[in-house]
Amino acid sequence: MMTSDTVLYRPSVQEGLAAEEALLEAVCRGESHLACLAWSPHDRALVMPRRHARLEGFDEARSRLEGQGWPVLFRATGGTPVPQGPMVVNLALVVRCEVRSSAAHLEWGYHRLGDPWCDWLASLGVAEADLGEVAGAYCDGRFNVRIAGRKLVGTAQRWRRVKGSRDMALLVHGAMQVDGEPSMLVEVVNAFQEVVDDPQRFQPDAHIALRQAVPELELEAALSDLMTRLRSSE
């Protein structure tokens, strides 16, 4: 259960995804203008867009992964499959905002999450944090948070209309591997790719876990600072 003094919520993957949706719904109903949630699941799942269920070989891939302790769940955003587990910390930021150019606001949304994240990494002593693509990374995009060119955080966003208003609610999400070797998660995604006969394969050295860059990290204290930065950034 998430309490008022809890920095990091530890739900199931399904509960974490539902908690993000609840934050978005609250802003859409006009009950909130800004909310932030950090969560790390106590279980594991491979989370992917629902369109993957139409792939030839999906049922076999799902069965194999479930047998290996990686059930398949679906999400509302696009991209490739992404592993979720206790080694991953998710940050969801929901903001009520005005809409102008949609393209400009897509970029604004990613910078609204990514720029404070890079500043936070710098405060931890990470010298080479920036936003950009990473060849060979799963669920790659232009606004990954990178360390020395390797993917630390994958980002995604959703826009919904605020009820009775021209304003929009933005949910922007980042998934960051904190512990373990990136190869652990890359192998799970590649196993799915192989069974559905998708030739794309992903590379462990395209990814980095946070403790590889900051071995002495005090996670809860550091996350509290990151959430403060996300709430206060303009």
Image (spheres, rainbow, N blue to C red):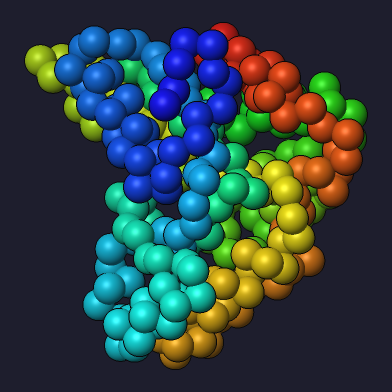
List x then y, in percent, for residue 6: 54, 18
Above or below: residue 63 compared with residue 39: below
At horizontal 61% and vertical 33% (from top left) the residue drawn is 114
Q: Is residue 107 left or right of residue 34?
A: right
Identify the image quadrant of the C terminus: top right
186 vs 30, left or right, is right
Q: Looking at the picture, does residue 46 appear above or below residue 175?
A: below
User: Is residue 114 depicted above or below 98 in this figure?
Assistant: below
Indicate the quadrant where residue 34 lies.
top left
* Quarter that holds the N terminus: top left
Name the spot of residue 174 as percent of width and height, x first. Answer: 54, 40
Q: Quadrant of residue 175?
A: top right
The image position of residue 41, as x and y in percent, is 50, 44
Residue under the image location 70 percent in, 72 percent down: 203
Residue 160 can be seen, yes or no: yes
Give the residue drawn at x 73%, y 23%.
Answer: 222
From the top left corner, tell me how far across and down residue 105 is, in percent. Answer: 41, 31
**Depicted 66 relative to depicted 87: above or below:** below
